[in-house]
Amino acid sequence: MTTPTGPAGFADFVNARYAALVRHGTLLTGDRGHGEDLAQEALVKTYRAWYRLHPDGDGEAYTRQVMVRAAWRAGRRLWRREIPTGQLPERREADPYEPRDTARLVLDALRALPSQQRVVLVMRYWAGLSEQEIAAQLGCSTGTVKSRSSRAISALRRMDGPLARAFDLSETSA
């Protein structure tokens, strides 16, 4: 049944899961604005497929799959639509606790990685997928997933700062 706002249940799904999808998109892209864009583009595709997905299918799994594939493909493009500048036009007030904010440290570290390495790490350690599941979702070999993951972890170990030190400690104690 279709309501004036769209297919039945879709608005409830978006209201309930939008924040989590944006958080997932932020991790995949390394930027909150791009994460919101990614979530919204994926929700448009989910909206179109909602009749196939609802009530028996998993709308969130479908949406996350669309997001992961879009983030993976974005890493292959040479043109990223934006040209970074050396200086931001606006600066917010300095937060004295920000250097110790773990979420900020993790996001900054992820942002420094190439997009395909970032996607693999997010799927492996945040979504909890196996290497085989990641390879199946991305349409690549398990070896590709392993090499991207290995390179990303090596890059994280080389980064300076509290996150790199914490990462090195966790690796030596395991």
Image: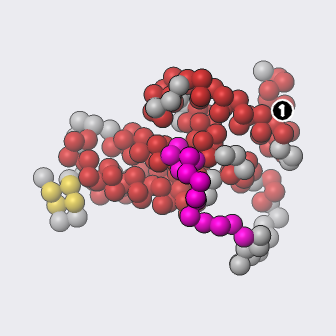
Task: Find the magenta span and give its range.
Answer: 72-85
Q: Position of residue 95 (x, y in %)?
A: 78, 67
Q: Position of residue 164 (x, y in %)?
A: 82, 40
In the rendered image, the residue lying farthest to the bottom is 89
Q: Position of residue 69 (x, y in %)?
A: 46, 43
Crowd tier of the residue under label 1, counting other residues whose Cα lies within 10 Å: few below 14, some 14–19, many 20 or above = some
Image side of residue 164 versus residue 80, left or right: right
Q: Nearer the viewer, residue 65 or 147?
A: 147
Q: Residue at x 12, y 52 (%)?
A: 1
Q: Residue at x 55, y 36 (%)?
A: 123
Task: Report the amino acid beneath label 1.
Answer: Asp
Image side of residue 97 versus residue 142, left or right: right
Tag count: 1
Residue 78 magenta-highlighted: yes
Q: Vertically, is 121 above or below 41? A: above
Q: Residue at x 80, y 26 (%)?
A: 171
User: Which residue position is annotated with label 1?
Assistant: 168
Residue 24 in sight from this viewpoint: no
Taken as a whole, is the magenta stretch helix, strand or loop? loop
Q: Position of residue 166 (x, y in %)?
A: 82, 37
Residue 134 magenta-highlighted: no
Q: Vertically, is 121 above or below 84? A: above
